[in-house]
Image (tube, rainbow, N blue to C red):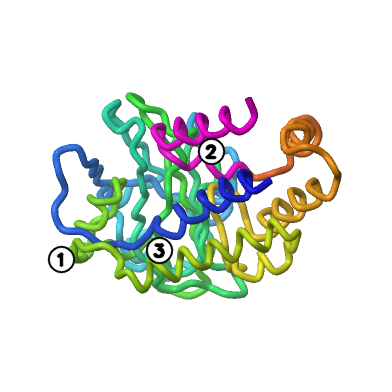
Amino acid sequence: MNCLVRLLNFSLMLMLFAFPFRGKAQPASEIALRLDGKWRIAFGIYASNKDALLPDYSDSNWIEASVPAFWNDYEFARGFSGLALYRKTFFVPEVARAKALYLLLGRINSVDETYLNGRLIGKTGTVQAPADGELRAYLLPDSLLEYGKLNTLAVRVFCNNLDGGIYAGVGKEKNLIGVFTKTAMRAALGQPAKPAPDSIAKIIRRTVEVMDTMLISRQPEAYMSLVSERYFNNGTRYAEQKLFAQTITHAWLVPLSLTTTFKSMKSHQLSSLPIMIQNLNGKTNQVISDMMSDIFS
């Protein structure tokens, strides 16, 4: 049981460190794929078409426009408010395999849902609680990326006023958006290259230790009190994360060995659980795979 808890919170700790946004230079091994420039955009009812989220959808009759920009910057969209859908294809080289890649989407008014190859990977804001101007940065799940091939981004944006759109990037010109490895993203953001101070690292480690204890002592509600209600990771929302904590703690109430518990979860419970480690890169997945083999062999 302790091993499963540590595995769960090992994944959580990686996510806590996922967006420190620091760094200066990017070595040759880093990836930086610029996505600012021409995108395809549809507005209104055309933007609500679910098929348009899929990679094989034809957007050849959509308007081509430069991104980032406010809708009001486009003559054809001046005065528009409501729903828009952006699409962009981009090539991911084979050398990016087994690297954690992040989509740095820039600043958006007001609400976005972002899809990679037809799957939701992140969203910020709601109609009731818009997130005007917040910087969007989403981890691209390794399981969804097509290496050595074209990939498709689809970004739905809703704004009920006249300054909607993916309107700003980063960098000196405020126009840089793209796909980056972490160090490259930190460089794009112009943040200093230094690790988090020991005081912060100790707080994070202590938090994870407390969360370990909460799960081991079967207190899912206390565990979830330390997870933000805005939690979102690889399609997993707060409610699903809560279900995950409740399910695994409930499973441990049954007097079974750890091996038996895990095997029974695989057959009738695991399908309903969010897979927390699928965001990790190939090397880390191998480490976890080896850990799991040692635990359950």
Q: CA distance from mark 1 to mark 2?
A: 32 Å
Residue lying at 48% horizontally and 56% vertically, measured from the top left: 13
Of pointers 1 and 2, the one earlier in the residue sequence: 2
Q: Secondary structure at mark 3?
A: strand
Q: Is residue 61 visible?
A: no
The question of residue 280 being in magenta is answered with yes
**Alpha-carbon span between mark 3 and mark 2:** 21 Å
Decide which of tag 3 and tag 2 comes sooner along the chain. 2
Residue under label 1, please give it: 172
The range drawn in magenta is: 275-297
Check disc 1 and give the amino acid type: Lys
Q: Residue furthest right?
A: 254
Q: Residues within 10 Å of mark 1 (few under 14, many from 20)?
A: few
Determine if residue 11 is in view: yes
Tag 1, which secondary structure? loop
In x, y percent, where is residue 16? 45, 60
Q: Closest to the observer: 123 or 198?
A: 198
Compared across the picture, whether 215 is left or right of 158 comes to: right
Q: Quadrant of residue 33?
A: top left
Label 2 is placed on what type of residue?
Answer: Gly
Front one among 68 and 147:
147
Question: Which residue is denoted by mark 3 in the rendering?
Answer: 165
The quarter of the rendered structure image containing the N terminus is top right
Residue 103 on image: x %, y %: 37, 50
Q: Which residue is mark 2?
A: 118
Is 145 situated left or right of 113 in this image? left
Choose between 280 and 72: the one closer to the eye: 280
